[in-house]
Image (cartoon, rainbow, N blue to C red):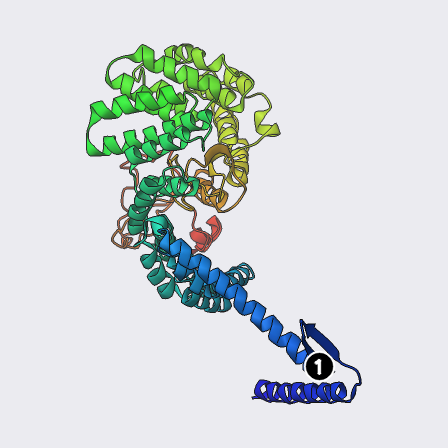
Amino acid sequence: MLWSLIKIVLFIGLIAALTWGAGILLETGGGVRVAIGTIEFNLGPLQALIGIGLLLVALWLVLKLLSLTVAILRFLSGDETAITRWRGRARERKGFEALADGLMALASGEGRAAMAKAARAERYLKRPELTNLITAQAAEMSGDRAKAEEVYKRLLQDERTRFVGVRGIMKQKLAAGDTDTAMKLAEKAFALKPRHEETQDILLRLQADHGDWSGARQTLGAKLKYGTLPRNVHRRRDAVLALGEAKSIVEEGKSIEARETAIQANKLSPDLVPAAVMAAESYIEKGQKKYAARVLTKAWNARPHPDLAAAFGTIEPDETPEARLKRFTALTRQHAGDPETKMLLAELNIAAENFGDARRAMGTLAEEAPTARSLTIMAAIERGEGAGDSIVKGYLARAVNASRGPQWVCGNCQHIPGHWTPVCGNCGAFDSLDWREAPQGSETAMQGGAMLPLIVGTPEPAKEEPPAEPVELAAPAEEAPGPDAPETPDTTAEPSNQNEAVVIDADAEPAPPEGEIEEHRKTG
């Protein structure tokens, strides 16, 4: 309403200004004389101004007629759209102006304004491949997902905008959590544009989440082919995918294929601990213990890990502790200063009851870098050397709140899955687990609660027994019982075990002194 009033006031002001100017020109003396041959025109100031205006209009009409003539000539020469373009030039100019305004509004975050400008541009241009994209993105920005999906589906009808439509719907499905449909759309988008890096990454992540390891390896190969992934990173991630494929084959019961895939994963990345363990297990199943030892030794040389030591032990499960200590020299002579090597050597010596050697192997590790494992090993050494319970329990008490040491930790979300997986189960990141020490948190508290019975002991469940009959204390040996005294049960039928644990009830009343017992017997 206010804007309409302002427009009326401006119109009246413009008319008043023109009238005032015309009056001034009428009162102004002089004029303009135009002579054309023998014809002469004398024009006043106002008439001259009107004549100039008419001359400009005539010039504009001449130019329009010339452009129409050129369009007609082009049409006659075979350009079928020449006259259509001549007629729609003004509309095209307005349409592109509206399109530019829509892009500016979209970049400014004004979703509703961008949709309005896109609709205006569509009325003038009739170019849906240009305006639909702005409309879809503006609808997403405004939160109108239904409108955005409708426009993206219209983009699928044009070959030039089909990829944009598929990609837009795919992102909407991802935002809605429909990963199954999103994966199919990602495969379609990848088929349309295999070089598109974002589509490659989305498809690879979805394939890994769904356990499609074979498809993920093909997508990874495409990333290497089109130069979006370095070769060394490709080898590492291909090994991770091959290991995931091997695990899925094991679940399906195809042992031969699983062995081959595990061995291939180990060859692609020898320092990948789970791949080395699985390859060693495959060699052990085939009876090739030498190859299993070689794989584990090579992986240990790259990075010591307890899983490698455990797999190395399964090569000869029935050997004596002394023979095992000798065989494990292939591992313990490498990285002698590494904490994992020290703890492994200490554990082997404890198993062989060489507690002095175990203490020398540990050195000052428990004091310089105390972890639950190193402190527990020291408790076992102290117990083996005959130390008192206070010393052993002191180490175990420290182990409750100590760090668990290196674990599989996701570098993206710091989640601790407990075992290695190709994809983090918490954030879905691919190949993000690293063997390192985790921040202190709930995992340490859980570990402490699990170790508490080692310190305080685990109480045995109480057994239900019938209530005991009251028994009077036996008389001393020097005093014979009276004739009315009840018979005393024989308490020496079974000798008591001196090593049996004694349970003390804190809530029970204290036993009376021996003198009071004797006085009670005499008076009772």
Q: What residue type is labelled 1?
A: Leu
Task: Decide which of 277, 478 is in the foreground and name it.
Answer: 277
Give the image quarter of residue 326.
Answer: top left
Q: Is residue 133 visible?
A: no
Query: Relative to residue 417, is residue 17 drawn left or right?
Result: right
Q: Which residue is drawn at 69% across and 79% down?
A: 41
Q: Where does the N terminus fall, quadrant-wise? A: bottom right
Query: Relative to residue 54, is residue 485 drawn left or right?
Result: left
Farthest residue, direction right: 29
Give the mark count: 1
Q: Which residue is drawn at 39% across and 28% down?
A: 225
Q: Can residue 55 be seen in this view?
A: yes
Compared with 289, 107 (above or below) is below
Image coordinates of residue 72 in percent, x first then y, are: 40, 59
Image coordinates of residue 343 in percent, x first then y, are: 49, 23
Image coordinates of residue 455 in percent, x first then y, are: 47, 39
Please rate how many residues cluster around mark 1, counting C-alpha atoms within 10 Å: few if below 14, some from 14 to 19, many from 20. some
Q: Which residue is drawn at 50% across and 18% down?
A: 358
Task: Decide which of 151, 20 is in the foreground and name it.
Answer: 20
Q: Name the residue under label 1.
A: 43
Compared with 252, 328 (above or below) is above
Compared with 423, 36 (above or below) is below
Farthest residue, direction left: 253
Circle 1 SS class: strand
Q: Where does the C terminus fall, quadrant-wise? A: bottom left
Image coordinates of residue 188 in percent, x first then y, are: 30, 45
Give the image quarter of residue 520.
Answer: bottom left
Task: Decide which of 215, 435 is in the foreground and name it.
Answer: 215
Query: Relative to residue 222, is residue 39 drawn left or right?
Result: right
